[in-house]
Structure formats: C-alpha cells, structure tokens
Amino acid sequence: MEFMQIGIYPGSFDPLTYGHLDIINRGKKVCDLLIIAVAKNSEKNCLFSVNERINIIQDCCDDEGIEITTFDGLLADYCMERNVSFILRGIRSVSDFEYENPIAVVNRKLAPEVETLFLMADAGAAFVSSRIVREIASYGGDLSSLVPPRVAEKIQRRFS
Ligand code: ADP
C-alpha cells in the first residue's frame, strides 16, 4: 500500500472563520488527507453544537482531500489511532505561540512520531478569531469580513 501523508487540523471551530479556511486550504497542499477534527470537549459555552459546527465546515469546504470529523480524549491518542503524520495549527500572534508551544512539546512526548506543523496566519486574517465573531454577532455587527456568507446567516439566525 502506498504511504499516505495524513494531517489533522484540530480545533473548536465555533464557528468556522475565514482564518480557519485559510489554514485548511494551505494545509491541504502539504498532505494527501487533511482531517478537520472538531474537539468534542469544546461543547461548553459554545454557540453551535459539535454537529452543527461539522455541518458548517462541510458547507464551506469542498470534499476533495479532506475529512471532517470529531474526536474525544487526547489528541495524541487519536493521531496514533488514525496514523496521522502531523498536527496542523495556525499562529496569529505571540500569544498563540505561547499557548501552542507547550502543547506541541507535550504532544511530541505522547506521540513521538507525530510532528506539529505551524502555519503563520495570513496577513488579512490574522485578526480573525471565533471569539471575535461571537462577540460581534452578539451585538448584531457585520460579519462579512470574518466568515463566509452562509456562516454569517446561520449565526444571525442563532442570535435572532
Ligand atoms: P482552539 O480552541 O483549539 O484554539 P480554534 O477553533 O479557535 O480552536 O482554532 C483552531 C486553530 O486554528 C488554532 O491553531 C488557531 O490558532 C487557528 N486559527 C484560528 N483562527 C485563525 C486565523 N485567523 N488565522 C490562522 N489560524 C487561525
């Protein structure tokens, strides 16, 4: 069997933003399969349920080269179970780096075969976060520069 390079992009994705989409599109280029994995433990204080977030991601991504799923428990265990070669994460700022660095180190201890790969945020999306989207949405603000139109519609319906 031919060796397949599998990457995983884990996160809360509550909701998916243009920043996530940028990482997905660039991440797809460096693997044969990119698993987009919505963390199940991120249900607390969320805007959308895990299933709703998966549906939103499905709506906004074309199927080729990606799998959209959810995972529970330790990411390192899930990576080994799925034969993942690398974990993909995005870095927007020094605070993202400080948050991600110890996690990457621990994940390498737990799963030495799995590398964490960081992509620097696109200049145009570096200010975009799901938290900012939720905040602006809660005041009825314009989301058009932050999320795709169909995501904005779903968010607006949730707040109306
Ligand atoms: P988590 O709760 O795991 O941080 P998020 O859904 O907030 O999940 O983010 C998932 C990943 O996507 C993280 O690596 C985060 O840094 C990255 N990310 C989020 N927004 C952006 C963005 N605008 N540009 C680049 N990377 C981003």
Image: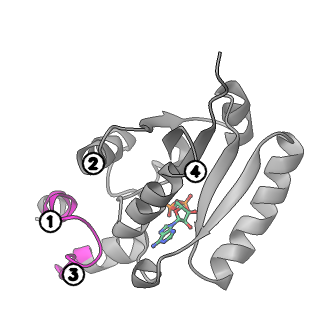
Residue in view at x 12 percent, y 59 percent: 157
Q: SS class of the residue under badge 3? A: loop
C-alpha distance separating marks 3 and 1 = 10 Å
Q: Which residue is mark 1?
A: 156
Q: Which residue is mark 4?
A: 30
Q: Residue 78 lies in what quarter of the image?
A: top right
Q: SS class of the residue under badge 4? A: loop
Q: Pick whichever of labels 3 and 4 is earlier in the sequence.
A: 4
- Residue 39 in sight here: no
Closer to the eye: label 3 or 4: 4
Q: Amino acid at mark 2?
A: Ile
Q: Which residues are magenta?
A: 137-156
C-alpha distance separating marks 3 and 4 = 38 Å
123 up-or-down from 64: above or below: below
List x then y, in percent, for residue 118.
65, 64
Number of marks in the image?
4
Closer to the eye: label 2 or 3: 2
Q: Pick whichever of labels 2 and 4 is earlier in the sequence.
A: 4
Residue in view at x 74 percent, y 40 percent: 76
Q: Amino acid at mark 3?
A: Tyr
Mark 2 Cβ and ligand 1 under 8 Å apart: no
Q: Amino acid at mark 4?
A: Val
Q: SS class of the residue under badge 2? A: helix
Q: Which residue is mark 2?
A: 56
